[in-house]
Amino acid sequence: MTGAALAAVLGSAGLVAVTAPAAYAATPSDEVAKLPISSFGAMVVDDAQERVYVTDGRMSGSGASAVLVYNFQGQRVGSLATDQPASGMALSADGATLHVSQSNRILTFDTATQARTGAASTPYDVTCGREVAVAGGKTWFTETPYTGGSYCDRPDNIALLYGVNGTSSTNTGWNSEGRLRLDTGPGAPDRLVMGQAGAGNAANAFLATFDASGENLVRGPQRRFADAEGKGALDLKDIAQSADGKRIAVADAAYGTRLLDAADLADAPVGYQPLPEGAKASAVAFSGDGKYVARGAAASGSTSDLLIQPADPADGGAPLEFAFEGELDGARVVPQGLSWAKDGSRLFAVTSDGGGHWLHVIKPPAAQYDSRFTGTLSTTPTKPVVGEPLGIRGKLELDGPAPAEPVKVEAVRKDADGTQEVAAAKVAADGSFTVLDVPDRLGEATYTLRFLGDVTHRPAQDVTVTVDVAKAATAIELTAPAEATRTGGVEITGTLTGQGRALPSGISLKVTRTDRFGTTGELTSASVAADGTFRIKDLPNKRGRTVYAVSYEGDALHSGSSAEATVRVIG
């Protein structure tokens, strides 16, 4: 498994908390169970019994199936037998009855005893799967009247909406093409939200609400999302209603997470920030306590697949971002694969890698404390040079309980070449840290330091420091004889060294000779070998004190340097 610089692998589950800009680097508690299914149908959370129900949504084959039952710790505790493959599910408003769709009936189960209590017929015996919802005290389900998995996702398929009436079903008269998705919520128990999915962009898919309080459904506002040019059509994956019933969130694979006013389906005044680049929305769910929203996505690599954040986008809180990677936790959140415990203490997420499926039980932080950078940032050395290590020292202060594991400070460097990430630095118990970098460009560089938060601490306000990166120093060292003769000549050896980046090859050093009369002449330049050494030979024509000067003019990354050697010429 891989992750970003501050990623933390949680146990053996493989959940990675991604430290994207303005996101928490969190490590919430995570339990994970490998689901014995090859496809996913639906998930329902029963708070009263602390049970999570999962169906496989099988779209082919026949024969007995089962609704998988897990507890709130992610442990499998049983199953509910069905005669045929099961798909959609819904819980009654009082939580006492679980409604389960199988290919030829809508079954009911007592959630306390797990016993089957009834069944209602359906107009078709299909394997395309159904959506099931409870609104206005009645049960509703969708129909795609075709058999055979290859037909189920045809955009021109008719999709029908039925209601349950005792042991039979009644056609509501509402229908569409493609598939239909349904949603209800405790904040508006009489409202049924229906959206068109799988119909393709050309259909300009709709979203509509219905009042289910009376004998017949009464349609409320509806909306299609494409503009006059046909762009922006809805690619619906999931629907969720806020705890107070005032907002409807839509997971739109073509757009992201849409937040709408439930009264008219217009865009909410403030929406959620975009999902990470490359992530396509697949699921959305509000916690029952109204505090959180979870947004699931399909993304590759270390790009976030799950964001947990305040339900109110005006809150301004940054999201917890997670990427599911590897063979132990799936690779993405499946459509409709998110559901909360009513009190917001747990988020249940179903992930898939295209074949296997996993159930994650995630516990968001119960409280968040402030953090801040204190004092001023200092650098060592005071005057940084290109190619040499630079240390940026500072201090981070954390309110609340001390973190269980050392937290880290991230940094980015911005110079004329753009913005580069810098390796994160661990924060010591006293809050001190040192970010290390090796600047590779001359001129001004601005370092921005960030603490992205952890499971109990909010992000700190970024701090910056700007430095002027200079050329690296060079030095010339000479070894010369104290005396020499005009006939024997003078031989001087030397070494050119440089800090920072390696010196370029093919360097030639300027060599001059000044005799005792003050006359200076330039000699043949000295070539520097790969190891930095060079040799100078000369036949001086004057006796007496003679000064040899060797200089390097410098290069793009190194400053120049020079050295002198004095030789007494005799004879």
Image (cartoon, rainbow, N blue to C red):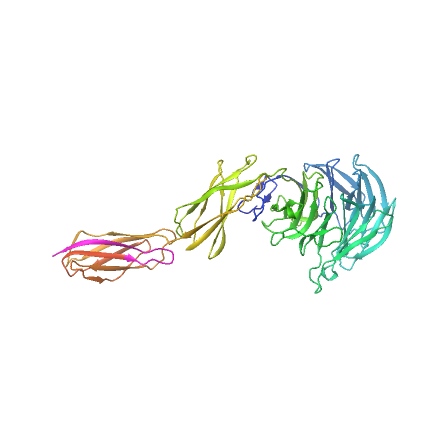
Is 23 on the left-hand or right-hand side of 500? right
Callout count: 0
Q: Does the magenta stretch include residue 570?
A: yes
**Most foreground residue, 444 or 560:** 444
Q: Work out whether residue 24 can be spotted.
A: yes
Position of the N terminus by quadrant? top right
Task: Classify residue 151 by image quadrant.
Answer: bottom right
Residue 298 pos. (x, y %): 65, 51
- Relative depth, front residue between 175 and 12: 175
Residue 341 within the segment the image draws in magenta: no
User: Does 133 sit above or below residue 231?
Assistant: above
| Quadrant of the drawing holding the C terminus | bottom left
Q: Which residue lies furthest to the bottom in this view?
A: 229
Side of 403 where 502 appears, left or right: left
Closer to the camera in the image, 565 or 427: 427
Q: Where is residue 261 in the image (x, y as percent from the top left)?
A: 73, 51
Magenta range is 551-571
Report x, y in % for residue 343: 70, 38
